[in-house]
Amino acid sequence: MKQNILLTGGAGFIGSHTADLLIKNGYNVVIVDNLSSGSDCNINKNAKFYNLDINSPDFEKVFKENKFDYVLHFAAQPGVSFSTENPAQDATENIIGTINVLKHSKQYGIKKFITISTAAVYGLPEYLPVDENHKLTCLSFYGLSKLTMEKYTQMFGIDYIIFRFANVYGPRQSSYGEAGVVAIFNDKMRNNEVITINGDGEQTRDFVYVEDVAKVCLLAIQSDVKNEIINVSTNKAVSVNELFKIMGEKYNYTKAPIYTEERYGDIKHSTLDNTKCRKLFDFVPKTSLEDGLSKLVESYKVGLKK
Ligand SMILES: NC(=O)c1ccc[n+]([C@@H]2O[C@H](COP(=O)([O-])OP(=O)(O)OC[C@H]3O[C@@H](n4cnc5c(N)ncnc54)[C@H](O)[C@@H]3O)[C@@H](O)[C@H]2O)c1
């Protein structure tokens, strides 16, 4: 019999790719999303959709009307700068919202709760690549709300997996959000607009392709792994200048970037160790940046919904 999955945030960037993969693999997917940053164009037509907020009193009816085997909780306020300006709303979405999903997941007896945290919980790296045992000294309210939701997840008394994603990129990503740089470059290059780079562009990030993180989420459902916190990353450092060059070649973009002041509080280098992911799932994200960016550029040629 087909297994039922509740996917919160399934109209968003990462959630919608994960829904596509789960459906392709024979799962029934029920999406709950309030479309605050997601879009109904992203929703897989074979998924059942509730246009609902996870904090709404009506949310429980989703559990009453469906019997879930697994819950994938992606719905969140994903912006670092939004969290700085709106800490209470950030906490409402990311902490209270998660508690609500956890509460019903426990009450209705699901098998495993899988949720998405972030590299932002680590704060300034003391060593690279950052592994799961690194100190947790988050520098933003977003990092803090995600760290808090991790702790609630661990203490709720249900089986869980917490993934800490590096900078995810790919089709359907909006230029707002945590890994905005690829999406911002993508928008600007397509429109042949001048690009501004903060600092000297030599800052590095660990860019992971969205279909690879969706695959890890599928493996989390298919495997017996439970009660673990796991980095999801490529463990490769790519500078913003390198990213600019590779994307520029794909778009035949020839404008020079404008370099401005470094952004206050920006981390210079960030890579996540993916040894634990490899050990537990025999898989790590492996799409090269070249290939991932080609797929991204191609998706704009054939239409974003594909
Ligand atoms: N994009 C990244 O690089 C990255 C990195 C680390 C972690 N994450 C985490 O991955 C998850 C997905 O992020 P994304 O990049 O796809 O962002 P996204 O904004 O595209 O997706 C979030 C989805 O959640 C929905 N949502 C938000 N609040 C809601 C609420 N209260 N009720 C119902 N739905 C709600 C939004 O409408 C959206 O569809 C988030 O938890 C985010 O914090 C993302």
Image (cartoon, rainbow, N blue to C red):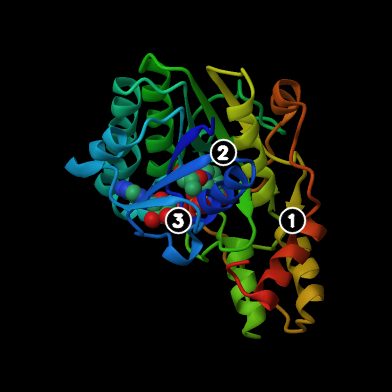
Does the residue tagged 3 have its C-beta within 8 Å of any atom of ligand 1?
yes
Does the residue tagged 2 have its C-beta within 8 Å of any atom of ligand 1?
yes
Compare residues 231 and 222 and report the one nearer the observer: 222
Using the image, determine if residue 60 lies above or below residue 102. below
Q: Pick the quarter of the image with the N terminus.
A: top right
Rendered residue at 50%/36% (across/down): 117
Q: Which residue is mark 1?
A: 239
In the image, which disc is placed on residue 302?
none
Q: Is residue 53 visible?
A: yes
Rendered residue at 17%/41% (across/down): 57
Query: So how many labels did they put on this image?
Result: 3
Label 2 and label 1: CA atoms lie apart by 17 Å
Quick one: label 2 or label 1, which is nearer the N terminus?
2
Location of residue 127 in the rendering, given as x and y in whole percent from the top left corner: 69, 30
Using the image, determine if residue 242 lies above or below residue 187. above
In the image, which disc is placed on residue 119?
2
Compare residues 285 and 48 and report the one nearer the observer: 48
Decide if residue 145 is on the left or right side of residue 289.
left
Q: Pick the quarter of the image with the C terminus.
A: bottom right
In the image, which disc is placed on residue 11?
3
Circle 1 packing at 10 Å, graded few (<14), some (14-19), many (20+), is some
Label 3 and label 1: CA atoms lie apart by 30 Å
Label 3 and label 2: CA atoms lie apart by 22 Å
| Picture quadrant of residue 191 | bottom right
Helix, strand or loop status at disc 1: strand
